[in-house]
Image (cartoon, grey):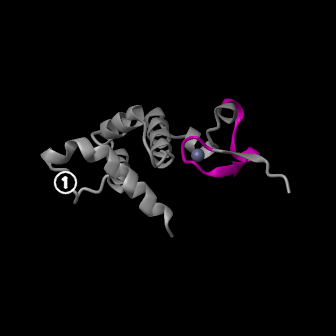
Amino acid sequence: MKKRGHCCKVCGEYKANEKFSGKDHAAHICKICAALPPEKHAEGMTLIRLVNLPWRLSKEQLSWLKKRMKDRRDAVRALATEQYEMRFPPRIEPDETKNDLEEDFDFYMDEETDIE
Ligand SMILES: [Zn+2]
């Protein structure tokens, strides 16, 4: 069965072609989201980007994520914090003497989650 549709860039939902209209179709923004103000578009796209972050972040992604944790939008801030804490659990405070090992530590976390 062939699926005809797109993933909306704003809400992240997969929707049929008819749920997209005109120029918004090209932009892959569904009709519902197209009716939202532009700042909502940006927020939605930011949230999707947060959800889609890889487990192992590049330096750029990490600094982007940290900035989002200070975002003025509550939803963005909450999700960014969640994403960050998934990777860097807050209860484990890297003490100053171990700062150099911080990167190795992330490795261990990764391996552990692979074992299911
Ligand atoms: Zn949408």
Q: Choose between 112 and 59: the one closer to the eye.
A: 112
Please state the horizontal and vertical placement of residue 14, each as a whole percent of the image: 66, 51
Count of labels in the image? 1
- Can I make out residue 84 in this image? no
| Residue bearing mark 1 | 93
What residue type is disc 1 on? Glu
Quarter of the rendering containing residue 70: top left
Give neighbour class at mark 1: few <14, some 14-19, many 20+ (Cα, 10 Å).
few
Is residue 95 shown left or right of residue 64?
left
From this viewpoint, which residue is outermost toward the bottom?
116
Q: Is residue 64 magenta?
A: no
Please state the horizontal and vertical placement of residue 91, each as a whole percent of the image: 22, 60
Q: Which residues are magenta?
A: 8-23
From this viewpoint, which residue is outermost toward the right?
1
Please state the horizontal and vertical placement of residue 64, each as a whole percent of the image: 37, 35
Q: Quadrant of the N terminus?
A: bottom right
Is residue 61 shown left or right of residue 3?
left
Q: Is residue 22 magenta?
A: yes
Secondary structure beneath dot 1 equals loop
Quarter of the rendering containing residue 26: top right
Residue 115 drawn above or below residue 59: below
Label 1, ligand 1: CB separation under 8 Å = no
Residue in the image at 50% along x and 45% along y: 48
Q: Choose between 88 and 31: the one closer to the eye.
A: 88
Q: Choose between 44 and 115: the one closer to the eye.
A: 115
